[in-house]
Amino acid sequence: MPQKFVLLVTFLITFSANAQTAQQRVRQYRQANETALLDEYREFLSIPNVSADSVNIRKNASFILQMMKKRGISGMLLDGPTPGTTPAVFGEVRVPGAKKTIVFYAHYDGQPVNPKQWAGGLQPFVPVFITAPIEQGGTIVTTYKSGDPIDPTWRLAGRGSADDKAGVMTILNAYDALVKSKIPLTANLKFLFEGEEEVGSTHLGAIFDKHRDKLASDLWIIADGPRHVSGKPIVQFGVRGDVNMYLTVYGAKRPLHSGNYGNWAPNPAMRLVKLLASMKDDNDQVIIKGFYDDVVPLTVSEKQAMANVPNMEAALKKELGIAKPDGNGAPFVDLLMRPTLNINGIQSANVGAMAGNIIPTKAEAVLDLRLVRGNDVTRQMGRVVDHIRAQGYQVLDHEPTDAERQQYPKLIKIQTGVGYNAQRTPMDLPIAQEVIAAVQSASTEQIVLSPSSGGSLPLYLFEKVLKANVVSVPVVNYDNNQHAENENVKVQYLWEGIEILSAIMLIK
Amino acid sequence: MPQKFVLLVTFLITFSANAQTAQQRVRQYRQANETALLDEYREFLSIPNVSADSVNIRKNASFILQMMKKRGISGMLLDGPTPGTTPAVFGEVRVPGAKKTIVFYAHYDGQPVNPKQWAGGLQPFVPVFITAPIEQGGTIVTTYKSGDPIDPTWRLAGRGSADDKAGVMTILNAYDALVKSKIPLTANLKFLFEGEEEVGSTHLGAIFDKHRDKLASDLWIIADGPRHVSGKPIVQFGVRGDVNMYLTVYGAKRPLHSGNYGNWAPNPAMRLVKLLASMKDDNDQVIIKGFYDDVVPLTVSEKQAMANVPNMEAALKKELGIAKPDGNGAPFVDLLMRPTLNINGIQSANVGAMAGNIIPTKAEAVLDLRLVRGNDVTRQMGRVVDHIRAQGYQVLDHEPTDAERQQYPKLIKIQTGVGYNAQRTPMDLPIAQEVIAAVQSASTEQIVLSPSSGGSLPLYLFEKVLKANVVSVPVVNYDNNQHAENENVKVQYLWEGIEILSAIMLIK
């Protein structure tokens, strides 16, 4: 047996034995305190947390400071660059002799709510247990009162229950379980809970910049988003970047009778469809020059991890009503590692009963570009703009003037959103391997390793501003109605989240 | 000088001399009666005439019967196939010894109105004189009272003032002017005023069928629509046909996160744009197989007439803000003689502030196909459907079932509107030439001859059901805000309309 392998096995056995013991003790602590944990969590969920509701957002921040205080964590608010910025809540635990510092991140703000859309008697900020998702016939457990046994298959429903107060809850209780179970800490621990993630983390970079020293670490753990569709725990090492482009193509200044002008007046809808169609070939590949050029090839570890991701395509195709996915046969996970060009929406004049026999005055489309490691958001958008110019368009950043209309046969207005690059932490880093081992140690099944989520978060900020390694360890169930009505978290996922995160806290 | 030319010149001189005399007498009659003519017309315009308003529509029909009675025309209502159908108003004047029978058509119903959109103090059914179009700074002539001199450059504003009570007004007054001026009639005259043109002439075919004998004739004159953009009188010998197609392309059953599914889940907006883009080449030619195959070539007379149509392209390009029209350099009038494929509207998910980073569930487009002589509406739509099938689509007439979603990679729902074929009367027919000569005789400038309007009317019914020749002789100004707010007719155009139509009534 090669020595390297012997060492690895020894390490795994040792680690696993220690962690298992710790895990059992964490579990026992949780089992003894389920009512208290969920009473506190329900109180937390009953504080409205829509990002724009600055009064209630601060109540949430205060509640988290109290939670920290109860657990012996010295906490404080980290304010942003300008007065009135939603503060982040910061806490720190220093451990003598520790060699590593790990920061645990979650966000306490939530998406806007429309209470009318919540069904089955649910209200966004009146957290209740439900027997199953409302959409699958679940009902409120009306008989429940504090102190009753809690079925771990129940779900706790309310805005933020999954996205992402569950991160705050499981992080602070993972820490508390270790302390209360008298398991010695091995790393310095920090906690950062953001209050404006759902509005684009507008000030996160500035907060990082201002509190750079306080936030120094070896590793950030992001407890946000759902576990894998298969239900298995997942460790994600990156996210795609994202940016929107807003296109408007112009025709005549007023809507024209399609009979009196048909064949003569340019139709901006036809021009826009030809323009958009020119961006992809029939195999769904983007054919904009250089679109895939910057992509950094996947590493061996990344490829191997992807090969081990459970294949959910058959189930997804059935659920979603798709006979043949895009991508010319490439596996789902591979496709998420490539940049995208997606049409979010398109509109010109009207369809259905409101449609008229006209030639529209303009046609609009919104694109989103997802970016992967190697892509630069400005460069990638530039390629799209270059492609549009190559189709003969004069590119404007404003409505065309009369003079521009007379001068240029093809006019397009292009506006762009605030975008950011992808982030990916190499899976081969020793600390990445330690996270994998910790999460695996807390799970009875083979965990899923993903080099990158298909979705986007501004994790590039952690790399760029803090020079930090970032790894995502989501804790909640996949079917949590994130961002939508009837949001919920499965109780068992909270319990497992506490065990998984406490295992990571024991990295040496 | 060849004999044929001598004869033609003789004919023109003779005809012109007779008509000129009659025209002068018609003009004198009108000049002596302007107040009475416009008092009656204003009363007519104050009866609301939205097609769906069946109570008021019948008041309009009664008013027209009274107008006929005052002029000694025996009138009646022609009912449709089912009780409650909006009646057409019919009148007839038999002339002993007449060799020809001419029917004059107009419609008395109007487009829906939104009084809030009417500006400058205008109300749809309170007709008033205005000094110029409201959009060009015109104002109401508030000082006017019945009996005051009427400036012929004024406009009379109100729904139906141009489209198409002006047809009824000028037809009946042209007849009256001839009779009151004691000019001997030479043809049997009939009058048909329809009450549901603006809702698609739903029962016109059935009314024709039911009253076929009563409506027998040598010629129909359609007094509807505007004169040429140049302001010159126009004689139109045809219309394009028209039909709508409603397309819906399907993606996944629910909106998907564009990050978590981007590159994998088919995007119906991208599929629809590729499908629509495949229908035209970069020179704006439709590349659907056979799309132009059925087009009957233009005759020598038609080509010559088109060559003489005043070229308004430079003015139109300026007015509409178009640097380069479609059609690869072909003249405007030529392009109106070809079939079209036009996108009326397109929509998938949202654009602008409502756009989300999603992959939409469906994408919709509405097409209209304009048809020319030779095209058959069913065959032409069939070509579009065949083209769509050739792009790999399974064509449905319903929302896809789960089984269909599983079976077919590309699904499209296609629905079609009620369509009809083009109609074109050969310009070489002797009776067509007589109409041209009559209209020219009543005009001081070179009239415009158009083999076909770019727009559509169900004139094929006249050919198909009544085996009749049909020629359109529009009377109103081009800038009349037809179908829109602030509709108006220029008074001078009413006066000229009376002269033009009376000249046609004198065809022998």
Image (cartoon, coloured by chain):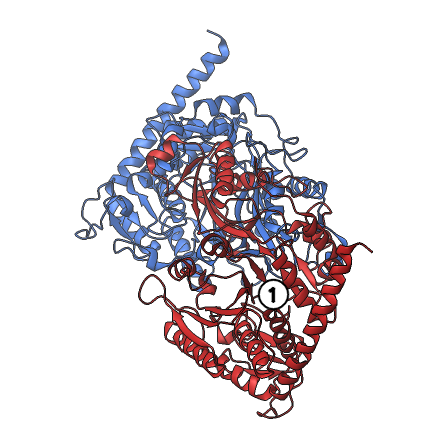
Chain colours: A red, B blue
Query: Residue B356: horizontal and vertical position, in percent?
Result: 51, 57
Residue found 50% across the figure and 32% down from its top? A390
Q: Quadrant of the N terminus of chain A?
A: bottom right
Numbered disc total? 1
Image check: B284 left or right of B228? right
Q: Chain of mark 1?
A: A
Q: Nearer the viewer, residue A256 or B302?
A: A256
Q: Please provide percent x and percent y for residue A340.
A: 59, 47
Image vertical order of residue A485 relative to residue B354, above or below = below
For the residue pair B500 and A186, the one nearer the viewer reads as A186
Residue carrying label 1? A473
Give the quarter of the figure containing the C terminus of chain A: bottom right
What amino acid type is highlighted by mark number 1? Val
Q: Is residue B94 left or right of residue A149?
A: left
Q: Label 1 crowding class (10 Å Cα cut-off): few <14, some 14-19, many 20+?
A: many
Kindly identify the residue that appears in the image at 58 percent across and 92 percent down.
Answer: A145
Residue A345 shows in the view: no
Residue most extreme to the top: B1
Q: Nearer the viewer, residue B129 or B118?
A: B118
Q: Is residue A345 left or right of residue A325?
A: left
Q: Residue at x 61, y 83 (%)?
A: A181
In terms of secondary structure, where does tag 1 sit?
Answer: loop
Say which quarter of the image contains residue B180.
Answer: top left
Where is residue A332 shown, x and y percent of the image? Answer: 69, 53
What percent of the width, then of the height, locates residue B28?
26, 36
Residue B256 visible in rendering: yes
- Outermost right residue: A1
Question: Relative to B392, is A486 above or below?
Answer: below
Query: Which residue extends farthest left?
Result: B143
